Image: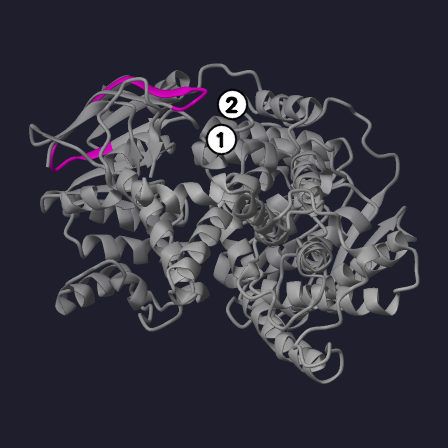
Amino acid sequence: MENLSFFLTTLTTPYYLGSMLNTATLFVIASLGAIFCTKSGELNLGGEGQIYLGGFITAILLNAFSTLPAFFAILFSFLAAMFFSGFLTLLSAILKKSKNTSFLLTSFIISAAIIPIIDGFIANRFNEGTLLATPFINERFRFPIIFPPSSLNVSFFIAIVLMILIYLFFSKTKFGSQIEVYGISPEFAIYSGLNITKISFVSAFMSGALHGLTGALAICGTYYTCHTSFAVGLGWNALSVAMIASNNPILTFPAAIFLAWILTSAERISMFNNANYDISSLIQAIILFIISIPFVANALKKKDKNPDVNAKII
Amino acid sequence: MNLQLKNIKVRFSHKTVLENFDIFFQENKIHALLGENGAGKSTTANIITGNLIPTFGQIYIDGKKVKFNSPKDAINHDICYVQQRPLLADDLTIKENILLGNKKVDKSELSKLADFWLKNIKLSSIQRNHGGDIKFFTALVATLLKKPKLLILDEPSALLDASQREFLYTNLKSICEQGTTIIIITHNMEEALNYCDYIYLLKHGKIEKQFPPKVITKQELSDFLFEKQKVQRYFPKSNVLLNKIFTLKFENVSARPSNQSAIFNLDFHVKQKEITLIKGTPESGLTTLENVITGMANFNCKGNIQLTQNHYLNLFTWNLKKGITPYIIRRKSGIRVGIIPSNKTFRASNPNLSILQMLLPNNSTKSKKHWEEAEKLINKSNINISPDEKSKSLSGGMLQRLILTRELESIPQLLICAEPLQGLDSATAKSFCEELRHFADNGAMIIVLSSSDFPQDICNNIYELEGGYIKSSTENITSDSIYNDIAL
């Protein structure tokens, strides 16, 4: 039974269950951002910086707008967070169009550049006393907790709504279908007369914007402050979620829950067994490797001929 | 090598391509698989080369049962395949492309084969700078280096001119005599009759007949293969397309791409109710010209495109220096444009797109309305496929038919066709040319770019491209001199 505690405790303890779902919430929204880019054939490796920037902008603005009504202060901060993070990714799309640079590389480089800049701002100008963090936001701006004692809050429902909206966007809208076509074959999309500048720019912007929203929700829902490097791991994990979900927006939820479960369980184990926190990353990697083995085995397995099975194109 | 396919069945989710398919290829002979588009020729080749695992059936080599799970298994059994459009790396040299996939290469053998098949071609030159014919021979040399016991050639003459075809087929005989069984996939009846030892006629996924060529004439073969078909109606029946006289002029069109043949100061035009043919080889600049006038050029161009109405009213002028894209041509020019590119597989379509996405790229959501629209286009093309299947399920000829139907559905006022007959069987090609002429007579402007035998009888203006220049031009051929019997 003790051996099963890794698997069960996270699911049966309210604190850990709530933490897992809260982490999954952030993964879902960021992975939806990653999906926007991958659907258009690009890979956004700048998630970390975009989330961090979104969180930073939100924290700064909410502190600046402390006298405004909560609704407007939050709305304006969120929009600003999404705009600036979206613009960060849009830069990569602009550079690709004008200079034919690699979107993947520039998204990573721009993100890598923005992180120490924000660290510097927090350390030197926007910090709370001796903490490497911005001042805590007013309690009026903090999202209500829905599952105490964890930090699971109403952003959980925002994630579900966004997931459905983005699924509908890609499956039911004209522009969403154009993005998919462009992602599969840019040459065909150009030949067909699709406005590929609009497609690539909007996809990039939305990808960054959703990452920025993730940062904003992390501030208002979980941390209530922007401490340095709060976004570490979020961007990369979100990318993993998008890949596990095969770029299907609806599947981001179970994929995020799964990854968050591994992360939360591993951190809990390392905390209570006096191990280095890096052990949790190792545990995640081992588990993901183990679960990928059945897929590898199936690919190598030679199936028996069955007349009812369809022909297979290699 | 004797090769036998027994009781083969190939079924995809919505159709059966081959059923109860039995065929035997005798060693050291040249066999022709002949049939119209969609008969199952390429599917047969894909099974033999391991690109497709059939639903059911067995493969026997020299009486011994074998199983191909991948192309590598076929190669290990000394079976090689030269595809209709050889997949070569355009940025590598010819020699590098030949060496790709060949583990151990006898240098003297390589030199001998290259000197024979690629006469006067520098092996150190970049593949992209050469036309389709050199691509074919590069792929052939790479294949012959492997010393195959079975060689499959898919539409080998599609990229070759008449003298090259003669050269190829004459020398295929000697390859055969050295111990290689050869299978040729073709819809060219003359080649099958003149050069092959056995002909297998495929129809609707079955072998209808098999015989040595001497027992049948070309006419009998044609009558059998292409039963009286309803003429494929690609084009609308309406007689009123335009009530204005449009003229499209291309002036001083020049381009010097770094990796393609250049074109210099080309002037040509097309008017409403006319077909303008620009003929030449890809290395004469035809591919570059296609990229320029269809907006797919990713290099600098010069020149002007001008669309006038009633000879004086300027409707649309575009300076090519500003860059032109299909978005501008299709959406901003003010006229309906259809474009049929030479690259059917990766430009006019993509193997990973669904048929729905390929037919309705502007809006391919799976709504009932779009589904029905896609099914309508599929039915018009006389193809049996579902909109949610992938384009890679289509044979080359079927893909071409679907592309033609898609582009013509909007009743374009300007139609640009590059190599429009490529991949079409004789009957479909003839029918298409007849319909193209009727379409022009109904008011459309049509530009055809062709490196192969496009019937000149139906054209009003003919320009010959050579070395990047227009070498000769014949303009304003009146419709009186265009006779109805279109010879192919």
Image coloring type = one colour
Between B396 and B272, the residue placed more toward the observer is B396
Secondary structure beneath dot 2 equals: loop
| Quadrant of the drawing holding the N terminus of chain A | top left
Q: Residue at x 20, y 39 (%)?
A: B182
Q: Chain of mark 2?
A: B
- Magenta stretch secondary structure, dominant: strand
The residue to which callout 1 is attached is: B398
Q: Is the Cβ of the residue at disc 1 closer than 8 Å to that at disc 2?
A: yes
| Label 2 neighbour load within 10 Å: few <14, some 14-19, many 20+ | some
Asked if both marks, 1 and 2, belong to the same chain, the answer given is: yes
Indicate yes or no whether the magenta region holds residue A13: no
Residue A177 on image: x %, y %: 66, 40
Question: Residue A258: image x %, image y %?
Answer: 48, 44
User: Does B15 appear in magenta?
Assistant: yes
Does residue B488 appear in the picture of this structure?
no
Vertical relation: B101 (above or below) A8: below
Depth order, front residue of A41/A263: A263
* Direction from residue B43 to residue B271 in the image, left or right: right
